[in-house]
Amino acid sequence: MAVWSDVPISQLEYSRIDADFYRPTYLKELQSWRRLDEHIGVAKLSRLIAAPIRTGRTPKSRRIKGDEQCVRFIKTDTVREGSIDFDNSALLPARVIGERDYIPDDALVITIIGATPEIVGRTAIVRPTDPECVTNQNVAVICTNGMCDPYYLTAYFQTKWGRDQIWRHSRRTEQVNLNCREVERVLVPNPTKSRQEEIGDLVRDSFASADRTLALYQKAQQLVEVELGLDKLAFQKPVGYTTCLSEIELSRRFDSEHYFPSFLAFRTGLPDGISLLPLSNYLEFCQRGKQPSYSKTGLPVINSKHVQPNRVINDGNRLAHANPDATLQIRFGDTLLNGTGRGTIGRAAPYLNKALSVADNHVTILRSTKLDPAYLSLYLNSPAGQMQVEMHQRGSSGQLELYPFDIRKFLVWPAPPEFQREIRRLHDMAAAAERESHMLLEHAKTRVERLIEEAVQS
Protein backbone atom coordinates (compact mmCIF):
# COMPACT_ATOMS: atom_id res chain seq x y z
CA MET A 1 0.00 0.00 0.00
CA ALA A 2 1.35 3.40 -0.95
CA VAL A 3 2.33 5.79 1.82
CA TRP A 4 2.78 9.53 1.38
CA SER A 5 2.94 12.82 3.24
CA ASP A 6 1.34 16.16 2.41
CA VAL A 7 3.81 18.92 3.22
CA PRO A 8 3.08 22.59 2.42
CA ILE A 9 5.89 24.43 0.66
CA SER A 10 6.13 26.78 3.64
CA GLN A 11 7.09 23.80 5.85
CA LEU A 12 9.92 22.48 3.67
CA GLU A 13 13.17 22.38 5.63
CA TYR A 14 16.77 22.95 4.52
CA SER A 15 15.69 23.08 0.85
CA ARG A 16 14.96 19.34 1.07
CA ILE A 17 12.37 18.16 -1.43
CA ASP A 18 13.19 14.42 -1.33
CA ALA A 19 10.30 12.27 -0.09
CA ASP A 20 12.47 10.27 2.34
CA PHE A 21 13.01 13.36 4.48
CA TYR A 22 9.24 13.73 4.99
CA ARG A 23 8.26 10.13 5.70
CA PRO A 24 5.12 9.97 7.90
CA THR A 25 7.05 8.26 10.70
CA TYR A 26 9.58 11.10 10.80
CA LEU A 27 6.88 13.76 10.75
CA LYS A 28 5.04 12.00 13.56
CA GLU A 29 8.26 11.94 15.58
CA LEU A 30 8.56 15.72 15.18
CA GLN A 31 5.47 16.10 17.36
CA SER A 32 7.18 13.98 20.03
CA TRP A 33 10.31 16.12 19.76
CA ARG A 34 8.25 19.23 20.51
CA ARG A 35 6.91 17.62 23.70
CA LEU A 36 10.41 16.47 24.56
CA ASP A 37 11.72 20.01 24.21
CA GLU A 38 9.08 21.26 26.65
CA HIS A 39 10.07 18.77 29.38
CA ILE A 40 13.82 18.12 29.18
CA GLY A 41 15.08 20.27 26.34
CA VAL A 42 16.24 19.53 22.81
CA ALA A 43 19.24 20.93 20.93
CA LYS A 44 20.60 20.60 17.44
CA LEU A 45 23.94 18.86 17.47
CA SER A 46 25.53 22.07 16.16
CA ARG A 47 24.97 23.64 19.61
CA LEU A 48 26.72 20.78 21.43
CA ILE A 49 30.01 20.64 19.53
CA ALA A 50 33.32 22.35 20.22
CA ALA A 51 34.31 22.55 16.54
CA PRO A 52 32.57 22.02 13.18
CA ILE A 53 32.06 18.36 12.39
CA ARG A 54 34.61 17.08 9.90
CA THR A 55 35.47 13.91 8.06
CA GLY A 56 38.86 12.34 7.57
CA ARG A 57 40.73 11.86 4.32
CA THR A 58 42.52 9.14 2.41
CA PRO A 59 46.13 10.10 1.65
CA LYS A 60 47.36 9.41 -1.88
CA SER A 61 50.51 7.75 -0.58
CA ARG A 62 49.65 4.86 1.75
CA ARG A 63 52.54 2.49 1.18
CA ILE A 64 54.36 1.52 4.38
CA LYS A 65 58.14 1.42 4.01
CA GLY A 66 60.00 -1.00 6.24
CA ASP A 67 59.50 -0.54 9.97
CA GLU A 68 58.37 3.10 9.86
CA GLN A 69 55.90 4.41 12.44
CA CYS A 70 52.25 3.76 11.57
CA VAL A 71 48.87 5.03 12.75
CA ARG A 72 45.53 3.19 12.83
CA PHE A 73 43.25 4.07 9.90
CA ILE A 74 39.55 3.74 10.81
CA LYS A 75 37.09 2.90 8.04
CA THR A 76 33.39 2.13 7.93
CA ASP A 77 33.88 -1.61 8.41
CA THR A 78 35.80 -1.14 11.67
CA VAL A 79 33.35 1.26 13.33
CA ARG A 80 31.10 -0.90 15.48
CA GLU A 81 28.18 0.12 17.69
CA GLY A 82 29.91 1.78 20.62
CA SER A 83 33.49 0.75 19.91
CA ILE A 84 36.16 0.58 17.24
CA ASP A 85 37.70 -2.66 15.99
CA PHE A 86 41.34 -1.54 16.14
CA ASP A 87 42.61 -5.13 15.70
CA ASN A 88 41.27 -5.22 12.14
CA SER A 89 41.79 -1.58 11.19
CA ALA A 90 44.21 -0.61 8.44
CA LEU A 91 47.50 1.24 8.98
CA LEU A 92 48.88 4.43 7.47
CA PRO A 93 52.48 5.66 7.64
CA ALA A 94 52.71 8.52 10.12
CA ARG A 95 54.66 10.63 7.60
CA VAL A 96 51.54 11.17 5.42
CA ILE A 97 49.34 12.33 8.31
CA GLY A 98 48.90 15.94 9.39
CA GLU A 99 48.40 17.12 12.95
CA ARG A 100 44.75 18.02 12.26
CA ASP A 101 44.02 14.51 10.95
CA TYR A 102 44.35 12.85 14.35
CA ILE A 103 41.10 12.12 16.18
CA PRO A 104 41.09 13.76 19.65
CA ASP A 105 40.38 11.83 22.85
CA ASP A 106 36.67 11.40 23.70
CA ALA A 107 35.64 12.35 20.16
CA LEU A 108 32.80 10.44 18.52
CA VAL A 109 33.14 8.84 15.10
CA ILE A 110 30.01 8.16 13.08
CA THR A 111 29.64 6.46 9.69
CA ILE A 112 27.98 8.78 7.16
CA ILE A 113 28.27 6.82 3.88
CA GLY A 114 27.15 3.27 3.21
CA ALA A 115 25.40 0.98 0.76
CA THR A 116 22.39 0.58 3.10
CA PRO A 117 20.87 2.66 5.92
CA GLU A 118 22.02 0.08 8.48
CA ILE A 119 25.65 0.94 7.76
CA VAL A 120 25.07 4.68 8.19
CA GLY A 121 24.90 5.98 11.75
CA ARG A 122 27.12 3.45 13.51
CA THR A 123 28.70 5.43 16.32
CA ALA A 124 31.73 4.82 18.52
CA ILE A 125 34.02 6.88 20.72
CA VAL A 126 37.80 7.22 20.74
CA ARG A 127 38.99 6.88 24.32
CA PRO A 128 42.24 8.25 25.76
CA THR A 129 43.55 4.67 26.11
CA ASP A 130 42.94 3.85 22.43
CA PRO A 131 45.79 3.94 19.92
CA GLU A 132 46.35 7.10 17.90
CA CYS A 133 44.05 7.02 14.89
CA VAL A 134 42.73 8.86 11.85
CA THR A 135 39.80 8.17 9.56
CA ASN A 136 38.62 8.59 5.97
CA GLN A 137 35.93 10.63 4.23
CA ASN A 138 33.18 8.09 5.02
CA VAL A 139 33.38 8.75 8.77
CA ALA A 140 32.54 11.99 10.59
CA VAL A 141 34.35 13.18 13.72
CA ILE A 142 32.32 14.90 16.46
CA CYS A 143 33.97 16.78 19.36
CA THR A 144 31.46 17.82 22.02
CA ASN A 145 31.60 20.94 24.17
CA GLY A 146 30.86 21.32 27.88
CA MET A 147 27.09 21.15 27.27
CA CYS A 148 27.14 17.47 26.32
CA ASP A 149 28.74 14.34 27.81
CA PRO A 150 30.26 12.50 24.81
CA TYR A 151 29.55 9.09 26.37
CA TYR A 152 25.88 10.02 26.79
CA LEU A 153 25.83 11.10 23.14
CA THR A 154 27.36 7.76 22.13
CA ALA A 155 24.51 5.90 23.85
CA TYR A 156 21.89 8.21 22.31
CA PHE A 157 23.07 7.61 18.74
CA GLN A 158 22.70 3.87 19.30
CA THR A 159 18.99 4.18 20.17
CA LYS A 160 16.10 4.15 17.69
CA TRP A 161 15.61 7.89 18.24
CA GLY A 162 19.21 8.68 17.39
CA ARG A 163 19.36 6.38 14.37
CA ASP A 164 16.07 7.80 13.04
CA GLN A 165 17.54 11.30 13.19
CA ILE A 166 20.61 10.18 11.25
CA TRP A 167 18.54 8.27 8.69
CA ARG A 168 16.12 11.15 8.24
CA HIS A 169 18.87 13.60 7.34
CA SER A 170 20.66 11.13 5.05
CA ARG A 171 20.18 11.23 1.29
CA ARG A 172 19.28 8.07 -0.66
CA THR A 173 21.29 8.38 -3.86
CA GLU A 174 23.46 5.58 -5.23
CA GLN A 175 24.61 5.25 -1.63
CA VAL A 176 23.06 6.40 1.62
CA ASN A 177 25.05 9.43 2.70
CA LEU A 178 25.17 12.60 4.76
CA ASN A 179 27.49 15.56 4.77
CA CYS A 180 28.88 17.11 7.93
CA ARG A 181 26.44 20.03 7.98
CA GLU A 182 23.51 17.62 7.81
CA VAL A 183 24.90 15.72 10.78
CA GLU A 184 25.01 19.00 12.72
CA ARG A 185 21.24 19.39 12.16
CA VAL A 186 20.18 16.21 13.97
CA LEU A 187 18.18 16.69 17.15
CA VAL A 188 19.57 15.56 20.50
CA PRO A 189 17.73 15.33 23.85
CA ASN A 190 19.51 17.78 26.14
CA PRO A 191 18.72 16.88 29.77
CA THR A 192 20.66 18.26 32.73
CA LYS A 193 24.37 17.56 32.91
CA SER A 194 23.89 15.28 35.93
CA ARG A 195 21.40 13.07 34.04
CA GLN A 196 23.74 12.95 31.07
CA GLU A 197 26.60 11.89 33.33
CA GLU A 198 24.50 9.13 34.93
CA ILE A 199 23.99 7.60 31.51
CA GLY A 200 27.55 8.39 30.43
CA ASP A 201 28.86 6.57 33.52
CA LEU A 202 27.08 3.40 32.41
CA VAL A 203 28.89 3.61 29.08
CA ARG A 204 32.21 4.26 30.86
CA ASP A 205 31.55 1.24 33.11
CA SER A 206 30.83 -0.79 29.98
CA PHE A 207 34.24 0.12 28.61
CA ALA A 208 35.87 -0.75 31.94
CA SER A 209 34.34 -4.25 31.73
CA ALA A 210 35.56 -4.55 28.15
CA ASP A 211 39.05 -3.63 29.35
CA ARG A 212 38.86 -6.40 31.99
CA THR A 213 37.89 -8.81 29.23
CA LEU A 214 40.99 -7.94 27.24
CA ALA A 215 43.24 -8.11 30.33
CA LEU A 216 41.98 -11.61 31.22
CA TYR A 217 42.49 -12.88 27.68
CA GLN A 218 46.01 -11.43 27.70
CA LYS A 219 46.75 -13.10 31.04
CA ALA A 220 45.64 -16.48 29.69
CA GLN A 221 47.68 -15.93 26.51
CA GLN A 222 50.77 -15.05 28.56
CA LEU A 223 50.41 -18.22 30.66
CA VAL A 224 50.45 -20.34 27.51
CA GLU A 225 53.42 -18.46 26.05
CA VAL A 226 55.45 -18.62 29.28
CA GLU A 227 54.94 -22.40 29.55
CA LEU A 228 56.14 -22.81 25.96
CA GLY A 229 59.12 -20.50 26.45
CA LEU A 230 57.84 -18.07 23.84
CA ASP A 231 58.43 -15.13 26.17
CA LYS A 232 62.19 -15.79 26.07
CA LEU A 233 62.50 -16.66 22.41
CA ALA A 234 63.82 -13.90 20.15
CA PHE A 235 63.00 -14.28 16.47
CA GLN A 236 65.55 -12.89 14.08
CA LYS A 237 64.77 -12.65 10.39
CA PRO A 238 67.33 -14.85 8.60
CA VAL A 239 69.26 -13.77 5.53
CA GLY A 240 68.83 -17.24 4.01
CA TYR A 241 68.26 -20.87 4.90
CA THR A 242 68.35 -24.31 3.36
CA THR A 243 66.29 -27.48 3.51
CA CYS A 244 66.82 -31.03 2.35
CA LEU A 245 65.29 -32.66 -0.71
CA SER A 246 63.59 -35.36 1.38
CA GLU A 247 61.62 -32.75 3.32
CA ILE A 248 60.48 -31.15 0.07
CA GLU A 249 59.40 -34.52 -1.29
CA LEU A 250 57.48 -35.26 1.93
CA SER A 251 55.61 -31.96 2.08
CA ARG A 252 55.39 -31.36 -1.69
CA ARG A 253 55.85 -27.68 -0.92
CA PHE A 254 58.22 -25.54 -2.97
CA ASP A 255 57.38 -22.15 -1.43
CA SER A 256 60.05 -20.73 0.87
CA GLU A 257 57.55 -19.66 3.53
CA HIS A 258 56.85 -23.31 4.36
CA TYR A 259 60.47 -23.76 5.46
CA PHE A 260 60.83 -20.52 7.40
CA PRO A 261 63.10 -21.49 10.34
CA SER A 262 61.39 -19.53 13.14
CA PHE A 263 59.15 -22.44 14.05
CA LEU A 264 62.10 -24.84 13.94
CA ALA A 265 63.98 -22.59 16.38
CA PHE A 266 60.95 -22.58 18.68
CA ARG A 267 60.43 -26.35 18.45
CA THR A 268 64.06 -27.20 19.19
CA GLY A 269 64.23 -24.78 22.13
CA LEU A 270 61.21 -25.97 24.11
CA PRO A 271 61.49 -26.05 27.92
CA ASP A 272 62.12 -29.41 29.60
CA GLY A 273 59.04 -31.60 29.81
CA ILE A 274 57.28 -29.85 26.91
CA SER A 275 56.76 -31.76 23.67
CA LEU A 276 54.67 -31.05 20.56
CA LEU A 277 52.50 -33.65 18.87
CA PRO A 278 50.38 -33.60 15.68
CA LEU A 279 46.99 -31.99 16.16
CA SER A 280 45.46 -34.91 14.24
CA ASN A 281 46.12 -37.11 17.31
CA TYR A 282 43.57 -35.07 19.29
CA LEU A 283 40.85 -34.35 16.74
CA GLU A 284 37.69 -36.33 16.20
CA PHE A 285 36.54 -33.92 13.49
CA CYS A 286 38.21 -31.35 11.26
CA GLN A 287 36.13 -30.05 8.39
CA ARG A 288 35.55 -26.74 6.64
CA GLY A 289 31.98 -25.50 6.34
CA LYS A 290 30.08 -25.08 3.10
CA GLN A 291 28.64 -22.04 1.38
CA PRO A 292 25.17 -21.83 2.96
CA SER A 293 21.82 -21.25 1.34
CA TYR A 294 20.63 -18.12 3.12
CA SER A 295 17.01 -17.75 4.16
CA LYS A 296 14.77 -15.80 6.52
CA THR A 297 14.67 -18.69 8.99
CA GLY A 298 17.15 -21.30 10.08
CA LEU A 299 20.44 -21.43 11.94
CA PRO A 300 22.81 -18.43 12.31
CA VAL A 301 25.79 -18.51 9.97
CA ILE A 302 29.29 -18.04 11.38
CA ASN A 303 31.73 -16.49 8.91
CA SER A 304 35.33 -15.33 9.22
CA LYS A 305 34.31 -11.91 10.58
CA HIS A 306 32.49 -13.54 13.48
CA VAL A 307 35.58 -15.52 14.50
CA GLN A 308 37.63 -13.06 16.55
CA PRO A 309 40.73 -14.09 18.54
CA ASN A 310 39.50 -16.33 21.39
CA ARG A 311 35.81 -15.45 21.05
CA VAL A 312 32.95 -15.76 18.58
CA ILE A 313 30.91 -12.60 17.97
CA ASN A 314 27.25 -13.46 17.39
CA ASP A 315 26.01 -10.17 16.02
CA GLY A 316 24.15 -9.52 12.79
CA ASN A 317 24.41 -13.16 11.65
CA ARG A 318 22.52 -14.10 8.53
CA LEU A 319 20.36 -17.22 8.71
CA ALA A 320 20.57 -20.34 6.60
CA HIS A 321 18.85 -23.68 6.30
CA ALA A 322 20.66 -26.39 8.24
CA ASN A 323 22.99 -28.37 6.00
CA PRO A 324 21.69 -31.89 5.33
CA ASP A 325 25.05 -33.12 6.64
CA ALA A 326 24.47 -32.55 10.36
CA THR A 327 28.18 -33.05 11.12
CA LEU A 328 28.86 -29.63 9.59
CA GLN A 329 26.80 -27.89 12.23
CA ILE A 330 28.80 -26.06 14.90
CA ARG A 331 28.26 -27.51 18.37
CA PHE A 332 29.04 -26.37 21.90
CA GLY A 333 32.71 -27.06 22.63
CA ASP A 334 33.96 -26.85 19.05
CA THR A 335 36.93 -24.72 18.08
CA LEU A 336 36.57 -22.53 14.98
CA LEU A 337 39.53 -21.60 12.79
CA ASN A 338 39.43 -19.19 9.88
CA GLY A 339 40.75 -20.87 6.76
CA THR A 340 40.84 -17.86 4.48
CA GLY A 341 40.45 -14.08 4.39
CA ARG A 342 42.93 -11.22 4.33
CA GLY A 343 43.76 -10.31 7.92
CA THR A 344 41.49 -13.04 9.34
CA ILE A 345 43.18 -16.28 8.26
CA GLY A 346 44.37 -18.37 11.20
CA ARG A 347 42.20 -16.70 13.85
CA ALA A 348 40.77 -19.21 16.32
CA ALA A 349 37.93 -19.08 18.84
CA PRO A 350 36.01 -21.54 21.03
CA TYR A 351 32.31 -21.95 20.35
CA LEU A 352 30.65 -21.99 23.78
CA ASN A 353 27.09 -21.26 22.74
CA LYS A 354 24.59 -24.07 23.35
CA ALA A 355 22.59 -23.10 20.26
CA LEU A 356 23.67 -24.76 17.01
CA SER A 357 25.16 -22.67 14.19
CA VAL A 358 26.34 -23.23 10.64
CA ALA A 359 29.86 -22.55 9.37
CA ASP A 360 30.34 -20.98 5.97
CA ASN A 361 33.09 -22.10 3.59
CA HIS A 362 35.70 -19.81 5.20
CA VAL A 363 35.52 -21.41 8.66
CA THR A 364 36.92 -24.81 9.70
CA ILE A 365 35.32 -26.74 12.57
CA LEU A 366 37.71 -28.54 14.96
CA ARG A 367 36.22 -31.00 17.45
CA SER A 368 38.21 -32.60 20.28
CA THR A 369 37.37 -34.28 23.56
CA LYS A 370 41.02 -34.20 24.65
CA LEU A 371 41.80 -30.50 24.26
CA ASP A 372 39.69 -27.79 25.87
CA PRO A 373 38.43 -25.43 23.13
CA ALA A 374 39.49 -22.30 25.06
CA TYR A 375 43.01 -23.69 25.51
CA LEU A 376 43.26 -24.86 21.88
CA SER A 377 42.14 -21.43 20.64
CA LEU A 378 44.71 -19.62 22.78
CA TYR A 379 47.45 -21.97 21.58
CA LEU A 380 46.49 -21.46 17.92
CA ASN A 381 46.39 -17.67 18.40
CA SER A 382 49.81 -17.66 20.09
CA PRO A 383 53.02 -17.25 18.07
CA ALA A 384 53.38 -21.05 18.17
CA GLY A 385 50.11 -21.42 16.26
CA GLN A 386 50.48 -18.38 14.02
CA MET A 387 53.92 -19.48 12.81
CA GLN A 388 52.31 -22.72 11.67
CA VAL A 389 49.52 -20.78 9.96
CA GLU A 390 52.23 -18.99 7.96
CA MET A 391 53.96 -22.28 7.21
CA HIS A 392 50.90 -24.23 6.08
CA GLN A 393 48.82 -21.61 4.28
CA ARG A 394 48.75 -21.92 0.51
CA GLY A 395 48.07 -19.62 -2.41
CA SER A 396 49.08 -16.11 -3.35
CA SER A 397 48.88 -12.91 -1.36
CA GLY A 398 45.56 -12.22 -3.07
CA GLN A 399 43.91 -15.39 -1.79
CA LEU A 400 45.56 -17.45 0.95
CA GLU A 401 43.97 -20.72 2.05
CA LEU A 402 44.45 -22.92 5.10
CA TYR A 403 42.99 -26.33 4.34
CA PRO A 404 41.81 -28.93 6.88
CA PHE A 405 44.39 -31.53 5.78
CA ASP A 406 47.13 -28.98 6.56
CA ILE A 407 45.54 -27.97 9.87
CA ARG A 408 45.76 -31.60 10.99
CA LYS A 409 49.55 -31.35 10.55
CA PHE A 410 49.86 -28.57 13.14
CA LEU A 411 51.97 -29.46 16.16
CA VAL A 412 50.35 -28.72 19.52
CA TRP A 413 51.28 -29.01 23.16
CA PRO A 414 48.81 -31.33 24.94
CA ALA A 415 48.93 -29.36 28.18
CA PRO A 416 48.12 -31.14 31.46
CA PRO A 417 44.40 -31.12 32.35
CA GLU A 418 44.90 -28.79 35.34
CA PHE A 419 46.64 -26.22 33.12
CA GLN A 420 43.86 -26.41 30.55
CA ARG A 421 41.28 -25.93 33.32
CA GLU A 422 43.08 -22.77 34.49
CA ILE A 423 43.06 -21.38 30.96
CA ARG A 424 39.36 -22.20 30.68
CA ARG A 425 38.68 -20.46 34.02
CA LEU A 426 40.35 -17.26 32.80
CA HIS A 427 38.51 -17.49 29.50
CA ASP A 428 35.15 -17.88 31.24
CA MET A 429 35.92 -14.87 33.46
CA ALA A 430 36.76 -12.83 30.36
CA ALA A 431 33.54 -13.93 28.67
CA ALA A 432 31.54 -12.95 31.77
CA ALA A 433 33.16 -9.49 31.78
CA GLU A 434 32.31 -9.14 28.09
CA ARG A 435 28.67 -10.02 28.77
CA GLU A 436 28.64 -7.44 31.57
CA SER A 437 30.02 -4.85 29.16
CA HIS A 438 27.21 -5.50 26.67
CA MET A 439 24.62 -5.44 29.46
CA LEU A 440 25.83 -2.05 30.74
CA LEU A 441 25.77 -0.56 27.24
CA GLU A 442 22.25 -1.87 26.67
CA HIS A 443 21.25 -0.42 30.04
CA ALA A 444 22.60 2.98 28.99
CA LYS A 445 20.64 2.87 25.73
CA THR A 446 17.49 1.84 27.62
CA ARG A 447 17.95 4.77 30.02
CA VAL A 448 18.10 7.20 27.09
CA GLU A 449 15.00 5.69 25.48
CA ARG A 450 13.11 5.72 28.78
CA LEU A 451 14.10 9.35 29.36
CA ILE A 452 12.67 10.29 25.96
CA GLU A 453 9.51 8.19 26.20
CA GLU A 454 8.61 9.41 29.70
CA ALA A 455 8.99 13.03 28.59
CA VAL A 456 6.92 12.45 25.44
CA GLN A 457 4.11 10.68 27.30
CA SER A 458 3.89 13.12 30.21
Image: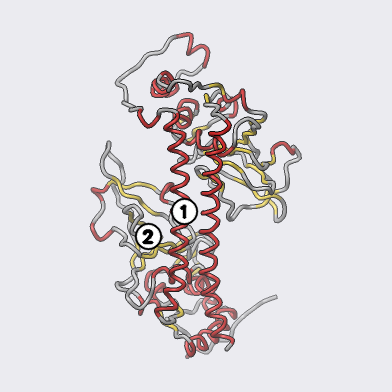
Alpha carbon distance from label 2 to label 1: 16 Å
The residue to which callout 1 is attached is 77
Looking at this view, is 1 or 192 the one in front? 192
Instruction: From the viewer's perspective, tell me whether residue 328 is left or right of residue 178.
Output: right
Instruction: From the viewer's perspective, tell me whether residue 71 is left or right of residue 452.
Output: left
The reply to whether dot 2 and dot 1 touch (C-beta < 8 Å) is: no
The residue to which callout 2 is attached is 126
Q: Nearer the viewer, mark 2 or mark 1?
A: 2
Q: Quadrant of residue 240?
A: top left
Type of amino acid under label 1: Asp
Q: Secondary structure at mark 1?
A: helix
Crowd tier of the residue under label 1, counting other residues whose Cα lies within 10 Å: few below 14, some 14–19, many 20 or above: some
Outermost residue on the right side: it is: 324
Q: Quadrant of the N terminus?
A: bottom right
Where is residue 265? Give x, y as percent. 39, 21
Type of amino acid under label 2: Val
Q: Quadrant of residue 106?
A: bottom left
Looking at this view, is 271 or 194 the one in front? 271
Where is residue 178? Give x, y as percent. 43, 68
Of the image marks 2 and 1, the number of the one nearer the N terminus: 1
Write the residue at 36% across / 51% down.
Answer: 73
Looking at this view, is 120 or 434 the one in front? 434
Write the residue at 30% across / 62% down.
Answer: 104
Where is residue 24? Give x, y as percent. 59, 81
Q: Quadrant of residue 350?
A: top right
Vertical relation: 40 (above or below) 349: below
Write the residue at 53% across / 46% down.
Answer: 305
Vertical relation: 69 (above or below) 126: above
Vertical relation: 294 (above or below) 100: above
